Image (cartoon, rainbow, N blue to C red):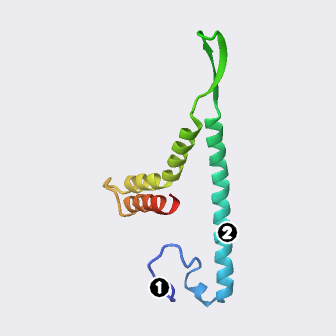
Amino acid sequence: LCEVGGSGTVVLPVFGDAEHRWPAGLRIVLYLLGLAWCFMGVALISDVFMGAIEQITSKKVRKYSPARGRWYTTHVWNPTVANLTLMALGSSAPEILLSVVETVLSNQFFSGDLGPSTIVGSAAFNLFVII
């Protein structure tokens, strides 16, 4: 990977062996710009996702109480439970979809090396780093 003709990766180096002839400073700047671009994409998607969660959990319903003789407004979802459930689903969705795609694309319908290890790694990261 770090030497001309090195292998072991699918994406890096982006421009092949010719990239090793570029100055190190230029490569650092280009890769940092690419990293910033990816973070901006994640930020935009996260904003849309959180807006969708807010829209789902803010739904209210009017109910009539015969005992009190009046109407009252209540939330459909408990906001805390809804946010925790939807965030867990949203954070696990990429790993689950990766595993499903890998299983469907393989003609044998057996899990490959990527899916289970991705799910286990994500769970370990969530348990030890986030919590």
Percent coordinates x, y for residue 9 in the rendering: 47, 76
- Does residue 118 lie above or below 34 as drawn? above
Q: Residue furthest front?
A: 68
Residue type, numbered disc 2:
Ala
Name the residue rendered at 57%, 40% in the picture: 80
Residue 30 shown left or right of residue 114 in the figure: right
Q: Is residue 103 left or right of residue 95?
A: left
Residue 111 vs residue 88, the one in the foreground: 88
Asked which secondary structure carries label 1, the reply is loop
Residue drawn 43% across and 62% down?
Answer: 121
Where 11 falls versus 5 (above or below)?
above
3D distance between C-alphas at marks 2 and 1: 26 Å
Badge 2 element: helix
If you read the primary sequence from the N terminus, does the residue marked by circle 2 or circle 1 appear first?
1
Q: Quadrant of residue 99?
A: bottom left
Q: Please name the amino acid that badge 1 sits on.
A: Gly
Q: Position of residue 34 (x, y in %)?
A: 65, 71
In the rendered image, which residue does mark 1 sit on?
Answer: 6
Could you classify mark 2 by the number of other residues whose Cα lies within 10 Å: few (under 14), some (14-19), or many (20 or more)? few
Number of numbered discs visible in the structure rendering: 2
Q: Which residue is mark 2?
A: 36
Task: Tell me where residue 72 appears, x and y as whole percent.
Answer: 66, 19
The answer to whether the residues at label 2 and label 1 have Cβ atoms under 8 Å apart is no
Residue 87: x and y in percent read: 55, 47
